[in-house]
Amino acid sequence: MKKMKEIDIHQDVDLSNVTKKAKGTLKDFKAFATRGNLIDMSVGVIIGGAFGKIVTSLVNDIIMPLISLATGKIDFTNLFIAFDGNYYATLEEAQAAGVSTLNYGNFLTAIIDFLIIAFCIFFFMHKLVVPKKQEETAPATTKECPYCKSTIHIDATRCPNCTSELSQELSE
Ligand SMILES: [Zn+2]
């Protein structure tokens, strides 16, 4: 509030105030950039892009041929409905003829892409992130004595340090 009032009073071009503000913004940005957020983000975007390429290749070069093999050599990209009712062997043929097509094969490919990405993310989260969390929240084997604040065994009914008697309720 005080700052806003100051600006109101010095409405007619106060350059020192403007440069001060600009310097403050620059400082904030520098703090943001050097804190690693920007670097982390950039790395994330680059890795994400590279990862996307791997997934695309995995789908197009490995998974799709296998699915095609299993389903009788159906190429998903050539699964489409031509709106003019004629038969076209390939999507390129239909597109070359200037026919509108409903490319549900491409849509299926996109869904499979998504499922694989989702599974990869789930796999990494499940295998790498969750076990770490479980480690952090591993069942406690010790507790704190409410009288002397020392760390003692979870099942102790009498504190070994101050010999205070501990009720079972506290052992939770
Ligand atoms: Zn104690």
Image (cartoon, rainbow, N blue to C red):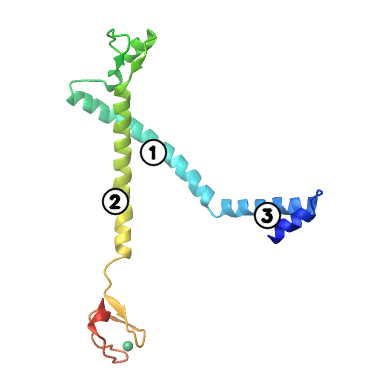
User: Residue 91: horizontal and vertical position, in percent?
Assistant: 33, 15
Q: Which quarter of the picture shows residue 109?
A: top left
Task: In the rendered view, tell whether residue 97 sits above or below residue 74.
Answer: above
Assess disc 3: are there few (<14), some (14-19) or many (≥20) residues with their C-alpha within 10 Å of its C-alpha. few
The amino acid type of the residue labelled 2 equals His
Badges 3 and 1: C-beta atoms under 8 Å apart?
no
**In which quadrant is the N terminus drawn?**
bottom right
Q: Of marks 3 and 2, which one's residue comes earlier in the chain?
A: 3
The residue that label 1 is drawn on is 51
Residue occupying image coordinates x 29% and y 27%: 108
Vertical relation: 105 (above or below) 90: below
Q: Name the residue rendered at 65%, 54% in the picture.
A: 27
Mark 1 vs mark 2: in front: 2
Instruction: Please report the residue visible at 27 percent of the width from the left and 80 percent of the height from the top.
Output: 170
On the rendering, which quadrant does ligand 1 occupy? bottom left
Left or right: 6 in relation to 160: right
Q: Is mark 2 within 8 Å of ligand 1?
A: no
Which residue position is annotated with label 2?
A: 126
The image quarter containing residue 107 is top left
- Of mark 1 and mark 2, the one earlier in the sequence is 1
Task: Name the quadrant of the C terminus.
Answer: bottom left
Q: Please, is residue 129 above or below residue 121 in the view?
A: below
Residue 144 against residue 114 in the figure, above or below = below
- Nearer mark to the viewer, of 3 and 2: 3
Q: Does residue 135 appear in this view? A: yes
Q: Nearer the viewer, residue 8 or 21?
A: 8
Instruction: Work out how far the residue at label 1 is from the one at label 2, CA to CA, in angstroms.
Output: 18 Å
The residue carrying mark 3 is: 24
Q: Secondary structure at mark 1?
A: helix
Q: CA distance from mark 3 to mark 2?
A: 42 Å
